[in-house]
Every structure is written in structure tokens, then in C-alpha cells.
Image (cartoon, rainbow, N blue to C red):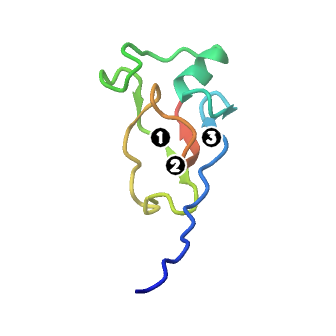
Amino acid sequence: MRGKRNRRRPEPAKVLIVELRRSGIELVVPPALTVLEALERRGIGVPSMCRAGLCGACEHRPLAVERAPGGRDHRPDQVPTPIRLCVTTVGSVTRLVLDL
């Protein structure tokens, strides 16, 4: 029987940086908040309804996404898939660039 290798999973990001391209604002999202909550605390209104990721009211297509090592990477020529700000939290994504 082979010994099991101790495989370490990549550490999740500790914070998420959100760059609001149009506003020129950079926002740090701590682990306890969603992107939507962090935007609201900063006084930036974004349409939202369900806050559960179901309705799509807060959905945005990021201009760019950076992921932590081991996260699913996008090819540079690939447009990032839309995200729902009400459920996006700190995790494998380390940076979002939004057109807000």
C-alpha cells in the first residue's frame, strides 16, 4: 500500500480587492462581507433584490478577474462570466474589476 501524500490545498485569499473602473475607487472586501455589502457600506448603490444569488438583479460582467493560485483561470482573451455581487465573497477570487 502506498503512503498518502500530504497535498496542501491552495490558501484561499484573505481579502478581495474590487476596482471600480469608472469611479476610480478601489475597495477591499473583508471575509465577513459580500461584494454587494461592501459596495453598499461605501455608499455605492447597486440594484439588488433577493440577496441569495437567484434573481440576477445584481449580476455584473467583470472587466477582469484575478484568481488565487490554484483557482480556475480565464484565458486573457476570454470574457469573464457574469458574477452576482450578492453572493461573491473572499475565496479563490483575489481581484475584480467592475465597470462601476
Read off the residue under disc 3: 16
Read off the residue under disc 2: 65
Q: CA distance from mark 3 to mark 1?
A: 14 Å
Read off the residue under disc 1: 62
Farthest front residue in view:
1
Cβ atoms at labels 1 and 2 below 8 Å apart: yes
Farthest left residue in view:
55
- Picture quarter containing residue 54? top left
Label 3 sits on a secondary structure element that is strand
In the depicted structure, whether residue 100 falls above or below residue 91: above
User: For the residue marked with disc 3, what is the amino acid?
Assistant: Leu
Provide residue 25's location: percent of width, then percent of height. Answer: 69, 30
User: For the residue marked with disc 2, what is the amino acid?
Assistant: Val
Provide residue 44's location: percent of width, then percent of height. Answer: 60, 17
Provide residue 14's location: percent of width, then percent of height. Answer: 67, 44
Closer to the camera: disc 3 or disc 2?
A: 3
Q: Nearer the viewer, residue 67 or 31?
A: 31
- In the rendered image, the quadrant that contains the N terminus is bottom left
Q: CA distance from mark 3 to mark 2?
A: 11 Å
> Which residue occupies 53% across, 23% down?
36
User: For the residue marked with disc 1, what is the amino acid?
Assistant: Pro
> Which residue occupies 65% across, 16% down?
41
Tally of numbered discs: 3
